[in-house]
Amino acid sequence: MSNDNTTGGGGLARRLNPLRLPLRHRLGLLGLAGMAVLPRLVSTSFVVTLSLAYFWGVYAMSWDVVSGYTGQISFGHGVFFAVGGYTSALLNLGYGIDPVLSIPVGVVLAAAAGLIIGVPALRLRGPYLSLVTLVAPLILTQVFIFRSDVFNGEQGLSGVSPLFGLQTFGGEVAFYYVAFGLFVFVLAVLLLVTRTDAGAVLTAIREDPDTVAASGLNPSKFKIMAFVLSAAIGGLAGAVIVHTPSGNASPTTLMTITVNVEVIIAAILGGMGTIVGAGVGGILLILLREQLAGIAWTVPVIGQPVSDINFLVFALITLVLLFVMPGGIVRTAIIAGRRVLDRGSGEDTVATDGGTAPARRVYERYTDRLRAAFGGDDR
Amino acid sequence: MSADTHDLTDTTTEEYGPDDGLLVLDHVTKRFGGLTAVDELSFAVDEGEILGFIGPNGAGKSTTFNCVVGRFPPTSGTVYYDGEDVTGTTAHRMVKRGLARTFQEFRPLEDRTVRANVALALTPDKLFSMQGLSGATRQRANELCERVGLGDRTELSPNELPHAGLLRLELARALATDPKLLLVDEPFAGLSNPEVERISELLLELREEGLTLVVVDHNMRGLLSLIDRAIVIQFGSMIAAGSPEAIRTDAAVREAYLGGDEL
């Protein structure tokens, strides 16, 4: 954490006093305030796009708390979104339970799913865990297709009651605030977890679980906490989105390979292991994708309009951004801002976890383990 | 046969109980498949002593060590710590009981400063805690860095530290857990003689402050002036025990090292 915060030593209230916060935190608060008044300034269609973007911010943050912080890469986070979403939708459709009550059940079941995948994952490191998370959504998708009578296969469930009885048409602004409220709530919860001691322990697990144990801390406990928290928040996002016009309980909204991959891209693009970066990344991902889908300009040589090949263009832009900003957009922006303001004292590290480009660190550890697992170089 | 080897014959046949020392190993055996790495090893570490735990490479030192600190459980036998049976207790629980260790290969957290490495070991093992944010934790971490001679390097990243600095960081992290017994794994490998002397001084000071130490090494270099007593193992069994001087002249020990490492 930044210097002025750690030496401050005062109470929580003092630490959160906006006037005492570092500039980047004040800018962040200003940004949130701006987002809160945005629906008054922009078109309805942009309000709808932004609503979806907030959900993606939450998806990406939920992924970040387990993969960005502990370094256990999940390739199938959609499982948790799906468990939350389908649970809430099925309860609502089948038993007429109000979304306000069915959403918490979805969260609990998603947390249970996190426990089911997280506990065996304690024995798995690096690539093995990733394989498990890669296969889990495939299994769930097959179950949904196999029991189409319950889950309606790849079409998913429709006709779910909207949250708070809001109207799909005319209620765009209200749904915007639902999504925005969820985003702010999750951001606050995850910042609280990662900016207190648990954040330092989680990133330490990413570095070396044995060192964490030698420091008298139980790595398994913290890993499970990260997994369950991440799953619960993913489940919450999934459960809420099915009751809004932003999505429905279908694999496309919650669980396809595209969803699983884009969540990872969003978090890495924004800044893995920072929470804020993942949230920003999720929002930017949707905005960028929607922007590209709206460009009718025809690309020369290929003779295709951008809107038809938007995912390709999107992937290429992502690739370039990852090369240019390996630490993510938020980290790069903070470093650039600091350079401009000439406040570049070495003390104030970018993220509270003190991470130097965790994406690179996670990648290095991951490849080390791959090599160890497959005996790449006679070890 | 010398008097020391007679001593040794006594120690191996003797039954050890929980109260024979701060740390007691009673017939500890560890097998990996068909390989017996540690074979019915029994010894006790007295409170306040510095014990040398010596053996040629591959003698089973690290395996014994790992059975004690809880990295893996022994196949059979009992480990007592502070009068209690702690066989198979996990690593973090052993640390909480007051048994800390250093890693021979040095395992700092490279993503954070020296101070943050030490501060992590001061963090309570709770899912929600804000203690790490307080000035007191920072202050304590600074003191510990000062204590091991890293006072002027708290802001550095571990990969900026020289070899001896990393050893000091290992010691600081271990001390941060407030141990009663500290297992130091091969501290002197790769250190120059003046560095060995300075680290020895530090370890002696820590003993003066009430710490019990077990120093593992594959030879006696640097240990002679440091340790009170030594245990020598080979092929997972004890071959000698006694004062450092007696160990150096022991026939079985000379045999074990013949043609190999200089003792």
Image (cartoon, coloured by chain):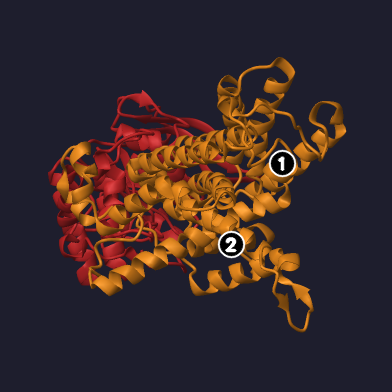
Chain colours: A orange, B red
**Vertical order, A240 against A335 (above or below):** above
**What residue did someone put label 1 on?**
A136
Q: Secondary structure at mark 1?
A: helix
**Vertical order, B83 against B109 (above or below):** above
Q: Image point 66% across, 40% down: which residue?
A: A247
Taking depth in this image into account, of B112 and B9 the one nearest to the observer is B112
**What residue did someone put label 2 on?**
A288
Q: Residue furthest bottom?
A: A301
Q: Are marks 1 and 2 on the same chain?
A: yes
On the image, the x and y values in percent for residue A103 come to 58, 26
Marks 1 and 2: which is nearer the front? 2
Taking depth in this image into account, of A266 and A180 the one nearest to the observer is A180
Q: Image point 24% across, 65% down: which residue?
A: B196
Q: Which chain is mark 2 on?
A: A
Taking depth in this image into account, of A216 and A90 the one nearest to the observer is A90
On the image, the x and y values in percent for residue B112 come to 33, 58
Taking B69 as reference, is B222 left or right? left
Name the quarter where the C terminus of chain B is drawn: bottom left
Residue B239 visible, this angle = no
Taking B153 as reference, is B121 left or right? right
Q: Amino acid at mark 2?
A: Leu
On the image, the x and y values in percent for residue B250 come to 34, 55
* C-alpha separation, residue under disc 1 versus residue under disc 2: 29 Å
**Vertical order, A360 against A282 (above or below):** below
